[in-house]
Every structure is written in C-alpha cells, then in structure tokens.
Image (spheres, grey):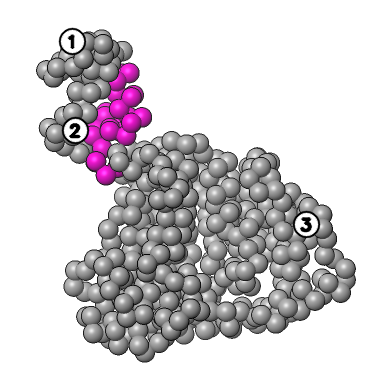
Amino acid sequence: MDQIFPSDLTRVERLVQSVIRNIESGSLAPGTRLPSIRRQATNTGVSPFTVAEAYDRLVSSGHIHARRGSGFFVKSQESKNAAPPPELALLALDEHWLLRNVYIQHGHGNHIPAGCGWLPGDWYDIESQQRALRTIARKGLITTEYGDPQGFKPLRQHLARQLNERDIMLSADEIVLTQGASSALNIAAATIARQGDTLFVDDPGYCNLLSSLTFHGFNIVGVPWTEHGPDTVEMEQLLRCYQPRAYFTNPWLQNPTGASYSASTAHQVLRLAEQHNFLIIEDNVSGDLAGHIQPTLAAMDESNRVIYIGSFSKTLSPGLRVGFIAARSRFVEVMVRYKMMSGMTTPEINERITFEMLQESRQRKQLDKLRDRLAQAQFSVARNFEKIGWTVFTKPQNGLFILAKPDQSADSFEFAQTAQQHGIMLAPGKLFRPAGADSPWLRFNVAYSQDPALWSYLLSCS
C-alpha cells in the first residue's frame, strides 16, 4: 500500500483502493490470485479482519471473485463492468430493441426476416383458433371477471395429464399459467433468486431471458454449448468459481443453436445440480416440435430441483400468449403471489381458447404437419449452407433455428448490418450471448430462409 491516500480513509478503504488501482493500472492482471487473507495482512501490516472486510467489498464491487478452497482472483474488466444493472432505456429487452436498425416487423416491405424468432402466420391453424373463439361465444363463456390466480383450471388439468404422459408427475395444482414462456421465466427468476445472486445460463441462449436477468441485477454466467448441449466439463470448472442459485437452460431444439441435450449431457447436468445444490429451470418451449418425445430433465429428476416451463406459442399461436410453469408445491405458492403482484391474473379468454383448440382431434394432425414442414425446412437450409461453404453449429432434425457462420473470420454484427441494406434481416450471435460478447455465428429461422434471394446474397459474401 505505497500509494498516497486521503487521511480520512479507513484501513479497509485504503486496501480496497490499493487493489482497485493495481487492477486498473494492469499491475494485477485478470485471473491473478491475490495473497491469502493472512499473507495480505502480513504484507500490509493490518489485521486479518481488515483484509477479510476489504476482500468482501471487492467481491461485492465485482473487482475480484472467490473460488471456494482456492482463494481470491481478479475478475476481467469486462465482467466487472457488466455487474451493475443497466438503465432500462439502454437495455436490449428483445431482438427489436437491440437491433432496431436491423430488425423490422415482418409484413412491412419486401424484406426477408431470416433471423426472426417466429413462424409465418400461415403455418398455424388459424381456422382452429377462430372456431374456438366462436364456441366460447356461443356457450356464453366470455366473462368480465378476473380468473383463477393459477390460471384456467380445465387447461391446467389438461396440461397435468400431458405432463404425466411424459413422466412429469405433477398435478393441476402444481401448474401456474403465464403470459407466454418469457413471463414464466421472469416469474421463476424473481421467486428463486435475489439481486446479486449468480445464475447460470446457456451461452449462447435466449436473448430476452439474458436481457431480463441482467436488468434485474443478477450475476449472469454463461455455460458454453456444444452440439450435444452444455459443455459439462466447462460447467464443472465454472462451479469451482461460482455458486449459482439456478441454471436456466433450453435443452431441446435450443434457441439459437437448434441443438438438444444428449442423454449423457442430461445426466451430467443433473449430477452437477445435485452435487452443487442449484436449481434447474427447464425451458422446453420447442419440445413439442421434436419428432419424438424426449426424456425431460424434470422427468429424470422427478421435479425435485427442476422447474419446468412450456408454451403454446410455437404450436398453436404466439398471439394467445399462453405459457405455464410446472413445479413442486413449495415453489408454486410464491410464484402465484409474484404473478398476482406483477400483473394480476392471466387473460382467461386466451386460456379458454387454448383449451378449446387442444380438444380438437385434428390438433394432433396439425402438429404432425408442422413438424414435417419444419423438418423439410431444416434439411433444405442445412444443405444450402453446405453448398455455399458455411459452417453450421449442428444439424437439427426439427425446430425453428439453425446457427451458421461463413468459413472466413467475420464480425456477425457488421455482417447483419450490411445484409440489412439488401433487405435481409439477420440475427448476429452477440444478441444471444451474456453481456453481448462477440460471436461469428448468425441465427437463421428455417421457415423464413427459403427465399432464393437470401442464398444468392450469402453466396456472394462467401
């Protein structure tokens, strides 16, 4: 502590400022291990209690982090600066906010929304939704009253039967209906964690979730993905540095990679959750689009530490905004309380429409048709990338998304900006990474990537 400090600083404050100055000057590089509390006390001539307090303050400020059993280490400047929650006006709440000059609403102009996150309207069964609405009106079921705080009970009972068929043995009373999966994820985060808690997320992962968690002041740590799901070796390394409250993950037909967990990866993630005592939030919004019923993490775990989230946006209609959380009773009570505090009950008319649509026998055929159409689109898009020499992250058998990059090194953000000038809307990889880290990858929606003009342009850039 050879720097000159104001005389009114305490010994703790002087030590804190000394470490910060050494970090900012580069004398202490990212990853550097600090002296132990006892050694630092000897080096600086203060008590171990003073050093312990100083280190606690440096951890809270994001300058250093503690590794259990290993000591204290200097954080990277990027990680430190990402710690404080940003202003809402500057936050990328969704893809349109982050790239308002790159994205436009589909339906305006002759643009190709190849990077968007939704299906074309004519891929849904609009007639089924109209019939359901007419049925509700004819039966006089439209009400002006608030609905059940947990959501329309017949729909919850229907969901419970579906989940039981997938070995998720939860009752209707252990299901909470929400306004889409995004709301469900927000409710889950707000009720299991507090500002400053560490949460693990997929890297890359769902952009709206990353923005929401960052805004609420959580410490977000990305777990790198492979074509078989999260890299569990890297995850185990991260668990030596962090103690996450939960891991938010999208295991099946993941957004944006299109990849799914292998059986081995699923078992490893559940093992790590048990060993390190963290929850898993399983976001399975695209699970119904798979050509087979996959074993969910919730079923494998018997819902002990897995909270399961689903939605009808990909299969029935995104406009209905009906999603759900399925969890053990100990979680449900507080989630319902938060749901009521933040937005009251969910629209019962939308939940009734969803329920009516699910009763139709043709709904299963419609879902099969949607799967087949997406499978054909996946095959076609992957083949086109192979023809133009691009690399794909993995080749999904179904689902909306495929992640790809040109073989030459390229900044995907600049690539997307240039493509916009040609009427092609792309989604650069940094959109899907914690703290907007750089990425060469671009997300493509296979349903909107059939236009020959898109491939002519990508080929010209290869």
Query: Which residue has dot 3 on it?
Result: 153
What residue lies at 23% left-to-right and 80% top-to-bottom?
461
Q: Residue furthest bottom?
A: 452
Residue 207 % position (x, y): 43, 58
Q: Secondary structure at mark 3?
A: helix
- Labels 3 and 2: the sequence-earlier one: 2
Q: Is residue 274 left or right of residue 226?
A: right
Q: Are marks 3 and 2 in contact (CB under 8 Å)?
A: no
Residue 215 seen: yes
Question: In front: 434, or 396?
Answer: 434
Disc 1: which residue: 45
Which range of residues does the magenta coloring cover?
51-79
**Residue visible at 77% across and 57% down in the picture:** 153
Q: Residue furthest right?
A: 139
As helix, strand or loop, the secondary structure at mark 1 comes to: loop
Callout 3 amino acid: Lys
Q: Quadrant of the C terminus?
A: bottom left
Left or right side of 297 for 425: left
The circle drawn on residue 23 is 2
Residue 171 left/right relative to 385: right
Q: Amino acid at mark 1?
A: Gly
Q: Is residue 24 left or right of residue 453?
A: left
Q: Quadrant of residue 378?
A: bottom left
Picture quadrant of residue 111: bottom left
Q: How many marks?
A: 3
On-image quarter of the N terminus: top left
Q: Is residue 59 above or below residue 406?
A: above
Measured as percent of width and height from the top left, residue 322 is found at: 65, 62
Q: Position of residue 273 (x, y in %)?
A: 46, 44
Q: Indicate the secondary structure of the residue bearing disc 2.
A: helix
